[in-house]
Image (tube, helix red, strand yellow):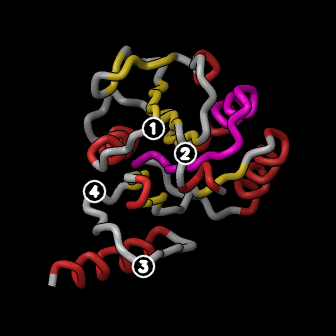
Amino acid sequence: MKNFFAPKSIAVLASFNNPESFGLTILQNILQNGYLGRVFTVDPESATALGFKNYAFITEIPSQIDLAIVNYSNKELSYFLNLCGEKGIKNVILFPTKNNKDPKNENFQSQLKDLARKNNLKILGPNSLGIINHQEKINISLQSQSGQAGVVSLFSQGIDAGQIFLNKISEFCRS
């Protein structure tokens, strides 16, 4: 679990063409929080993202990756998770695209479990707030303002409850 909460290297797989994409927001949050590890971006359709050279495929990255953040539609998801498995990545956070609803159907959940087993992946998401760890200066979430380092930890099963708690904690810290 350490590579979820304190990864030394992160790969963000997303479409960075759209300035409103979740992938771009997540990448901005990682950088703005002062993350000190290595960051790689993967997008076969664009050359760069926020100054990073985009790799067309995650398998082209010459370094070991501790954590992959995948922001693609469900129909593309199996392709990207198989590439993560091929690369030897063990930890993945899934964020659905903005126009892609998080399906609750059993078929999708079953496919996701099969992909995780096949590729030996630990998966957080797709209905997740992400991970914010102030001790490691890491914000892998859609929440740009994430409070401050302290003695409180929060773990939430779903994005809605997580955002409500995080907002309340942030309000409390400001008062």
Q: Residues within 10 Å of mark 4 (few under 14, many from 20)?
A: some
Q: Amino acid at mark 3?
A: Val
Where in the figure is residue 33, as x and y percent of width and height?
30, 50
2 and 1 marks in contact (CB < 8 Å): yes
**What's drawn in magenta, residue-wise?**
80-98
Q: CA distance from mark 4 to mark 2?
A: 19 Å
Q: CA distance from mark 1 to mark 3?
A: 24 Å
Quarter in which the C terminus is drawn? bottom left
Q: Earlier in the sequence, mark 4 or mark 2?
A: 2
Q: Secondary structure at mark 2?
A: loop
Q: Earlier in the sequence, mark 2 or mark 1?
A: 2
Q: Is residue 173 left or right of residue 37?
A: left
Foreground mark, 1 or 4, reads 1
Q: Which residue is mark 2?
A: 7
Q: Which residue is mark 4?
A: 144
Q: CA distance from mark 2 to mark 1?
A: 7 Å
Q: Earlier in the sequence, mark 1 or mark 4?
A: 1
Q: Which residue is mark 3?
A: 152
Q: Which residue is mark 1?
A: 37
Q: Residues within 10 Å of mark 2 (few under 14, many from 20)?
A: many
Foreground mark, 4 or 3, reads 3
